[in-house]
Amino acid sequence: QTDVRVISVGLDGYHHGQNYLKENADDNGEPLLNHKGRFDSFDTASFERDLELFKKEEEVAFPIYSRKTHEPVAGLAACKKEEPVLLILDGLWLLYDKKPWTNLYPFYDYKIFFHAPADVLKKNTIERHVRGGKGSSEESTAFYESSDAKNTELIINNIGKHDLDFSW
C-alpha cells in the first residue's frame, strides 16, 4: 500500500499581483485590477511552468492565494519528486477553450466541470468577497455584476472538452 498526498491548487494563486494588475491595462485601456478574476488577470506562463515540473516529477511549490492580502503567496503547496501526489486543480478558466488556456490541457488527466445554479454562484461569490474584505455587500455585489458574472458567462459559453459534467 502506498500513501498518496493530495494537493489542491486553486487557480487564484496564479493571479498577477495587485501592482501588476494596477499598472497593466486590458485591450480597452482599463486597469486589469478592474477585472481581477478574468482570464487575462492570471499568470498562465507560470502556471504552465509549474504543471510541467509536476508532470516531470520534479520538485515544485505551488502558490496559494491569500484572501487577506489579495495576493498570491509563492511556494506554500510544495511537493517533492519522490512522493506520490494526487494534484487537484480548481479554477474557472481551466477549461476555457482559448489560448493560452488550451496550452494547459495536456497537463490534465481528467477534467470535471461543476455546474451550480446562478443564484448559488452569486451568493457564494459575494459572501467570499465580503469575508475577504473586498468591500461591503453592496460593493461586492457591484463587482460581481461587473466582473464575476461576466466571467462565468464567458466560460460557460466557451468551455473546452471535458470528461464529466457534474451538476450541483
Image (cartoon, grey):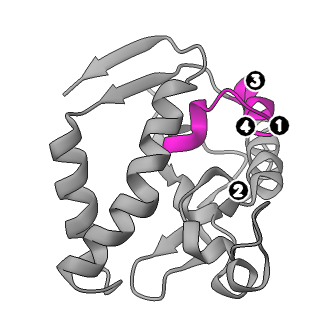
The reply to whether callout 2 and callout 4 are in contact (CB within 8 Å) is: no
Could you tell me residue 64's position as x and y percent? 53, 68
Going by the numbered disc 4, the residue's amino acid type is: Trp
The mark nearer the N terminus, 3 or 1, is 1
Residue at image position (24%, 33%) is 116
Determine if residue 30 is in view.
yes
Name the amino acid, label 1: Lys
Give the labeled residue for mark 2. 40
In this view of the protein, can residue 131 be seen by the observer? no
CA distance separating discs 4 and 3: 11 Å
Q: Quadrant of residue 31?
A: bottom right
Q: Are marks 1 and 4 in contact (CB under 8 Å)?
A: no
Vertical side of 94 occupied by 160: above or below: above
Secondary structure under tag 3 reads helix
- Measure the C-alpha gap from mark 2 to mark 3: 20 Å
Q: Nearer the viewer, mark 2 or mark 3?
A: 2
* First to last magenta residue range: 91-107
Q: Dot 2 lies on which element?
A: helix
- Return the residue at label 1: 56
Q: As drawn, is 136 to the left or to the right of 160?
A: left
Q: Residue at x 38, y 50 (%)?
A: 149
Q: Give the label, 3 or 1, closer to the camera.
A: 3
- Residue 56 at x, y percent in the picture: 82, 37
The amino acid sitting under disc 2 is Asp
Of badges 4 and 3, nearer the viewer stands 4
Label 3: few (<14), some or many (≥20) within 10 Å?
Answer: few
Residue under label 3: 106
Which residue is located at x 67 percent, y 26 percent? Answer: 97
User: Where does label 4 land, which residue?
Assistant: 101
Q: Disc 1 and disc 4: Cα gap in Å?
A: 20 Å
Instruction: Name the secondary structure under disc 4.
Output: helix
